[in-house]
Image (cartoon, rainbow, N blue to C red):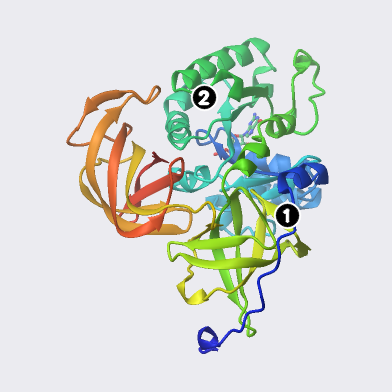
């Protein structure tokens, strides 16, 4: 095997582009949209139960599997946890002798392929959520509407999670006002909670039109996929949760018009000397014959073939997971985490970045690792330019010595190596294996 990289590859001339108007083709092809979301909210708000219910109603989980969990849960005196087990792979209860035989994070509706990012667990939630939120197109915020619990939740993790979403630039939120059956489907309670959460979210800079409120019962499956048949809920005529999810999927057109970007998640080399790069297209479109550049190495290549799932295609668009067969590239200089772009519209490579960061620990000039997806690089916080208002982003204080946890600041980062990154991207900074800040590059 070791000699593959040294094989002398005699390339045939690059394939000619068919000059396809990819955006038009995509719109006419009625291809499904792709969207990813993260589920946030206080511990015990009902996140796992809700996701279990969703998968059950969409028939991705069989009733008899849930029945099995119910029997196992009953033995432990915790019947209500059966649905949560469907989804929550980390549950401690689950670890004690209950086997896992389903784990799916994907489901689809007529219009959209959804990915649920990071199964909500009971503990260690924030670090996992950061990874999920970094990729999310939108978020589902689960609120426990049962008396007392809701007030506690808003002060606790809910606030922390929402601030993180905001700092990562996640704009759309579906608020699932959960356990409403436990308060007799009180319309008053629903409105009270919606108004308060709406004020809280808009106060942090979310736009009202990007927030939806849906009264649900995850446990009983009301207003998730099917409308509630409970008389007490007849006042509600709005969308179900699944309709709310569909309506929150950002329009793909905007991300298709952006320059082509794909982070490499896998690299395959064939004996014949062709190189195939796999990844999810972050933005833009691609077609056979396109001239590509891999950054940071600056290696250039032409697209020979495109595979979507197991089908060969002439083109692909943002959101799709593809394998791109390349002509004329030396794979030695290509690594997982590198960015593929068009030669005519390349991503910049640099080692100095400004980041609008939300701090989870004290920030000051110090060594850090910068992460974006699989790309990571060592460097340091060089200086702190300003402390910012969380909601408006306005400068509160220039050149603070330290940033307190929970605050937002503009931070200058200098990396030891040059990496392909650009404004608007979501990044995380870590030190000693802990995430200390997350935010957007400016
Ligand atoms: P998570 O920590 O947010 O994932 O919450 P879980 O899904 O583990 O649920 C926590 C508790 O709330 C469990 O006892 C669930 O049975 C219960 N629960 C979840 N959804 C509902 C609901 O719609 N109504 C009621 N009454 N209880 C619920």
* Mark 2 CB lies closer than 8 A to ligand 1: no
- Percent across and percent down for residue 239 are 74, 24
Q: Residue furthest top?
A: 188
Residue at 72 percent across and 34 percent down: it is 246
- Percent across and percent down for residue 315 are 72, 56
- Percent across and percent down for residue 442 are 39, 38
Is the residue 142 above or below the residue 146 in the image?
below
* Mark 1 CB lies closer than 8 A to ligand 1: no
- Examine the rendering and report whether any part of residue 36 can be seen: no
Depth check, front residue: 117 or 24:
24
- Percent across and percent down for residue 153 are 48, 27
| Quarter holding residue 289 | bottom right
Residue under numbered circle 1: 19
Q: CA distance from mark 2 to mark 1?
A: 58 Å
Depth check, front residue: 332 or 133:
332
As helix, strand or loop, the secondary structure at mark 1 comes to loop
- Quadrant location of ligand 1? top right
As helix, strand or loop, the secondary structure at mark 2 comes to helix
In primary-sequence order, the first of circles 2 and 1 is 1
Residue at 51 percent across and 44 percent down: it is 122
Is the residue 20 above or below the residue 215 in the image?
below
Residue at 50 percent across and 33 percent down: it is 42
Q: Residue furthest left?
A: 401
Label 2 neighbour load within 10 Å: few <14, some 14-19, many 20+: some
Report the side of 31 relative to 141 (left or right): right
Query: Which disc number belongs to residue 304?
Result: none
Is the residue 235 above or below the residue 307 in the image?
above
Residue under numbered circle 2: 149
Depth check, front residue: 192 or 332:
332
């Amino acid at each position: 095997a070791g000699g593959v990289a040294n094989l002398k590859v005699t390339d045939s001339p690059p394939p000619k582009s068919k000059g396809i108007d990819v955006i038009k083709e995509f719109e006419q092809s009625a291809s499904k949209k792709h969207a990813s979301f993260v589920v946030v909210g206080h511990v015990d708000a009902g996140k796992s139960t809700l996701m279990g219910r969703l998968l059950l109603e969409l028939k991705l989980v069989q009733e008899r599997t849930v029945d099995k969990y119910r029997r196992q849960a009953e033995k432990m005196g915790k019947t209500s946890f059966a649905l949560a087990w469907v989804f929550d792979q980390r549950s401690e209860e689950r670890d004690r002798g209950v086997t896992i035989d389903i784990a799916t994070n994907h489901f689809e509706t007529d219009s959209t392929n959804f990915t649920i990012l990071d199964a909500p667990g009971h503990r260690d939630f924030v670090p996992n959520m950061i990874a999920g939120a970094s990729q999310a197109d939108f978020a589902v915020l689960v609120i426990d509407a049962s008396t007392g619990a809701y007030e506690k939740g808003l002060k606790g993790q809910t606030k922390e999670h929402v601030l993180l979403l905001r700092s990562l630039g996640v704009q759309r939120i579906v608020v699932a006002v959960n356990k409403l059956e436990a308060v007799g489907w009180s319309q008053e309670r629903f409105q009270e909670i919606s108004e308060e959460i709406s004020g809280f979210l808009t106060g942090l800079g979310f736009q009202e039109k990007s927030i939806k409120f849906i009264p649900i019962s995850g446990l009983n499956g009301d207003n998730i996929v099917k409308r509630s048949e409970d008389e007490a809920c007849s006042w509600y005529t709005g969308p179900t949760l699944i309709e709310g999810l569909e309506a929150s999927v950002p329009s793909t057109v905007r991300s298709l018009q952006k320059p082509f970007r794909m982070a490499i998640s896998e690299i395959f080399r064939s004996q014949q000397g062709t190189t195939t790069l796999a990844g999810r297209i972050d933005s833009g479109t691609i077609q056979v014959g396109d001239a590509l550049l891999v950054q940071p190495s600056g290696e250039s290549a032409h697209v020979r073939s495109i595979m979507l799932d197991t089908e060969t295609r002439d083109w692909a668009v943002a959101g799709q997971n593809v394998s791109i067969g390349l002509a004329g590239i030396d794979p030695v200089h290509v690594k997982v985490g590198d960015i593929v772009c068009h030669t005519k519209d390349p991503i910049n490579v640099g080692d100095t970045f400004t980041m609008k960061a939300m701090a989870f620990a004290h920030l000051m000039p110090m060594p850090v690792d910068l992460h974006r997806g699989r790309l990571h690089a060592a460097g340091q916080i060089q200086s702190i330019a300003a402390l910012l208002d969380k909601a408006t982003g306005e400068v509160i204080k220039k050149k603070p010595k330290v940033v307190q946890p929970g605050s937002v600041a503009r931070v200058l980062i200098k990396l030891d190596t040059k990496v392909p990154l650009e404004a608007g991207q979501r990044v995380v900074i870590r030190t000693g294996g802990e995430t200390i800040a997350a935010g957007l590059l400016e």
